[in-house]
Amino acid sequence: MLLACPPVKPAPFEYHAPERLDEAAQLLAEHADEAKILAGGQSLIPMLALRLTSFPHLVDLGRVADLRGVEQANGSVRIKAMTTQAAIEKDASVGAAVPLLAKAIPLIGHFQIRNRGTVGGSIAHADPASELPAVALALDASIEVTGKGGTRTVAAADFFEGTWTTAMAEDEILSAVSFPTWSGTTGFGVEELARRHGDFAIAGVVAGVELDGSSVKRAAIALFGMDSTPVRASSAEAAVTGTSGAAADLEAAGQAAVAELDPPTDIHGSSAYRKKVGAVLVARALTQALEEARRG
């Protein structure tokens, strides 16, 4: 008996390799919804190969030198979009300035993927189970998008609109992301549940805390894999702020984080299972963050 096999080659497309950002923006404006940006390709290439999607034009940003690099100034770390995840993972200065990035990036796939995958590509792809969109949301990152008419800045809270959907127009390119740095007595934690290391998370949490003496002065918490976008857990942040961070405080924060969520049900877990796991992961991520902060 012959079994039908899925396609393993993409549909035909025209390949464009601009060397300047304005040239790339012009190509997008020219081809509109028939064009797709190719950044690292770790998400797009498999989807094209399986013909889950197709585009007549691919615009590869790999030769745009202006889209690579890291700048630190004015209390933030600005990462240009085509900077690879591996480059950030290996950059000790970025890890010191934005520890949440250093903790989250090693959980993205495997090192081969991080060698190709880019920071901007991951955030622009807006997969709700991805780590970097949640980090951007938790830290109130500013996202720069560039089109034919120039560059504008979008707050991370306004950027993610749905699964694989963002506030960018069809002719805009994510060009950089600025992550604010935290000062004071701070700590950060990342927790996720996946079937195996490198898989997309069934549920995950990123968290940061700032202490004032023995109490929590500030908290930032975002969940991923729990909705069609990463979710800022404002109620959980409020629940833990002003407390000593005792086990009961963290459990209450976990319950607050998932109280109003209706996570998806799929082959990996039911909605109720994800809510239960999400609450536990919030408490664990906060515990990790508090332990780091208390170590000084």
Image (tube, rainbow, N blue to C red):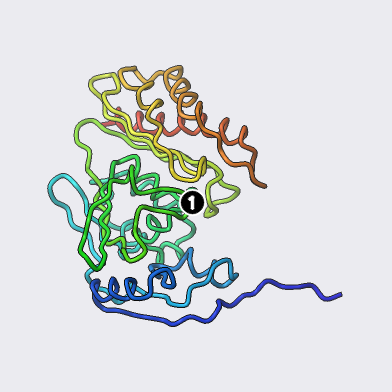
Amino acid residing under circle 1: Thr
Vertical arrangement, residue 177 with respect to residue 46, above or below: above
User: From the image, which quarter does the N terminus lie in?
Assistant: bottom right
Residue indicated by mark 1: 163
Which residue is most to the left?
74
Tell me where residue 125 appears, x and y as whole percent. Answer: 43, 58
Determine which quarter of the picture holds residue 78. bottom left
Tell me where residue 104 appears, x and y as whole percent. Answer: 40, 48
Left or right of 5 in this view: 55: left
Left or right of 43 in this view: 76: left
Left or right of 58 in this view: 241: left
Write the residue at 48% across / 73% down: 55
Vertical arrangement, residue 79 with respect to residue 16, above or below: above
* Secondary element at tag 1: loop
Tell me where residue 8 appears, x and y as whole percent. Answer: 62, 75
Write the residue at 38% across / 68% down: 39
Write the residue at 82% across / 76% down: 2
Left or right of 240 in this view: 268: right
Q: Tag 1: Cα neighbours inside 10 Å, few (<14), some, or many (≥20)?
A: some
Tell me where residue 252 appears, x and y as whole percent. Answer: 46, 20
For this rendering, which residue is in front, 53 or 269? 53
Determine which quarter of the picture holds residue 188. top left
For this rendering, which residue is in front, 116 or 223? 223
Vertical arrangement, residue 51 with respect to residue 234, above or below: below
Write the residue at 49% across / 51% down: 163
User: From the image, which quarter does the C terminus lie in?
Assistant: top left
Disc count in the image? 1
